[in-house]
Amino acid sequence: MEKKTADKPEPPGKRINAKRLAEDLDVSISTISRAFNKQAVIAPETRSKVLDYADRLGYRPNPYAQSLITQKSRIVGIIVSHLENPFYPEALRGLSEALREAGWHVMLFTVPSGETPDDILPLAISYQPEFVIVMAVTISSRAQEVAERAGTKLIYFNRRDPNSSIFYVVCDNAHGGGMIADHFIDTGCRRLAYIAGFQNASTTLDRWRGFRDRCIARGFADVWREEGYSFSYEAGYRAAIRLMKRHPHPDAVFCASDIIALGCIEAVRTEFGLRVPEDVSVAGLDNIEMAAWPSHSLTTYSQPLDRMIEASVKLIEEISIGAENETVAWQIKGDIIVRKSTRPPPGGKRSEVVPDSPA
Amino acid sequence: MEKKTADKPEPPGKRINAKRLAEDLDVSISTISRAFNKQAVIAPETRSKVLDYADRLGYRPNPYAQSLITQKSRIVGIIVSHLENPFYPEALRGLSEALREAGWHVMLFTVPSGETPDDILPLAISYQPEFVIVMAVTISSRAQEVAERAGTKLIYFNRRDPNSSIFYVVCDNAHGGGMIADHFIDTGCRRLAYIAGFQNASTTLDRWRGFRDRCIARGFADVWREEGYSFSYEAGYRAAIRLMKRHPHPDAVFCASDIIALGCIEAVRTEFGLRVPEDVSVAGLDNIEMAAWPSHSLTTYSQPLDRMIEASVKLIEEISIGAENETVAWQIKGDIIVRKSTRPPPGGKRSEVVPDSPA
DNA sequence: TCTTGAGGTGCAATCGTTTGCAGCAATCGT
DNA sequence: ACGATTGCTGCAAACGATTGCACCTCAAGA
């Protein structure tokens, strides 16, 4: 048997693999494999010998071979449909980083306008991710079956579907709606209105429910509702125009998202010549970064993004190691953030006194 | 040999594979494979028989086995570092959709603040994507070698590195700078300034070069330059404050990106009580969606995103099929879009007369 | 001295495809 | 009528890892 000296010159071509390392180091392929596997039994000095040499050669175990044999991909797919709403890039970034830290790879699937998540899901599962996070509208039950058959688990992020058993992570939207209602009423607003997003989105519904219920509870039974049909600046702009044509027009508008609220404010100002907040208070929900810009200074209810992300990753990790999980849903409370798009409280105090100038 | 009837009841467990189909249909595994491979020779009726049955069972070839044997992953990694700049979500969405249509899967890698693309690249190539699109700062030459050794090709998007041979796709930033300079000068501005982004980014440099050169060519030799240090609203806000403290203060500011321009406008208005565009013209470059909002109505130079994306995908496809490609770089011209953040031309005409109200 | 066990390593089967090559039946030209 | 061609299909060897099992060595205990 020919004795090999380690670190022999690169034979041309041929991607380097475990076999190559094994030959060079006079060990078996199994040993190479075990050196890379944390819980495998292997002599410490053997492991470091392998790892060092692998490092010099730039060797890493082939992920496809690994996935093939272990039936695990360490891939999480993310389906996102509305990147034009700044909340989603923020969420996407956070999720991507947190998943990466937890050792997952992220595969991205955007939903083109005109298509539904249902259309994309088959594609998303075609690479057999272990999980798919759906940051979008809901998935039909038929599509859910397809995913299940493929062995892919679905998780909703910022969505929930009361009719399905899909795990979800959301902020407490109803609580948010309630807080905004309180704030409006506490600051003397009386003609209250809501601008909705997508009609059937759980976010639209929950925020509306929380808002309206609190209004009713405090004696304001007829809250106006205007459909926005989507979560976008344009939607807010147009819905606000329709809404403000009422007589009397509302003096407080809760928008189903920050980006809707920004469109709403703009319409109120330019189309009706009204002042915000003197004539109309406007609040959103999300607390996107833009909301803090001085030009907007939007009162809003913050989605606790960090904790939502943390919960999502935790959920994935637990399901992944097979812990039969009783917590199928996370609903996390956020905080109201009062800025200058709503009337100041009677006392004149604001929760954020600083004029939000960039630090 | 036992005769199998097609469509037998699901044996429990066991992900279904080509072998299973082959047995059920009394053909070989090769035939199953060929049915899915467009250019394989196979009798049309055999193919449709296989495909139909596969469809009923929900079978799809295992991508890991495919990648393993073919040494191709059909995966494109995208490294993006600044999702808070709305240009990148827009670009990301477009790229993601175009790549998907071309049959590629997209793996997303975000660069956490405090880390560089160099830190992320090893991770990005660990899943052996065939390409990695870098929408971020530049990659060191050491990291480039690592990628090359792993067989992954790098492509810059909206970046270029004159010192490397990495393929890139950018818009004609220098042309953009020149167009803005012309516009400023044509509309009577005389004290011209530039707010930079990241100091060493090619975008910062090229836009500056185009802008300054044209200014000089037209007789305005001393163009002021203020560092922004990053492409963000806050950076623009702060840089504008420093810039406007000059005496005399500038009457036209070209910002290295739209998002910087928005911050700049806000600072000019709130910190100095000046009017835009009456006292100061402000222009950006990118033409992000927000730039068209009535509240901003930003004059800018549009990045031809669609064509840049098209070029990127074409580049990838061509390299992928081994066409030795002479076009290693795409530099695509955009258009100036005059809105209301800059003084109107003497004639009073604007290229966009419509007040940009959401359609 | 012999047995036992622990620690470490190698063998070989396996994951689910692709693809060059060989084989075989049917068709064609002469 | 017969060899050549064409059109399909199957065989079997990869691809590059993981892992249960067997085996070997050496130290400790009896």
Image: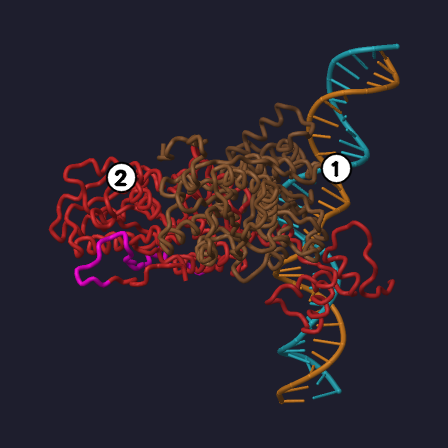
Chain colours: A brown, B red, C orange, D cyan
Q: Is residue A178 above or below residue A194?
A: above
Residue B334 included in the magenta stretch of the image: yes
Is residue A108 in view from this perspective? Answer: yes
Q: Secondary structure at mark 1?
A: loop
Boundaries of the magenta span? B323-349
Kind of element beneath mark 2:
helix
Q: Which residue is mark 2?
A: B240
Residue toward you, A89 or B352: B352
Residue B89 pos. (x, y %): 45, 49
Between B213 and A14, the residue placed more toward the observer is B213
Q: Residue at x 79, y 62 (%)?
A: B24
Residue B279 in the figure: left or right of residue A13: left
Q: Which mark is residue A309?
A: none
Q: Chain of mark 2?
A: B
On whether residue A123 falls in the magenta region, the answer is: no
In this orientation, which residue lies closer to the viewer: B19 or A200? A200
**Dot 2 amino acid type:** Ala
Q: Which mark is residue A324?
A: 1
Alpha carbon distance from label 1 to label 2: 55 Å
Please, is residue B350 above or below residue A179 in the view?
Answer: below
Main secondary structure type of the part rendered in magenta: loop
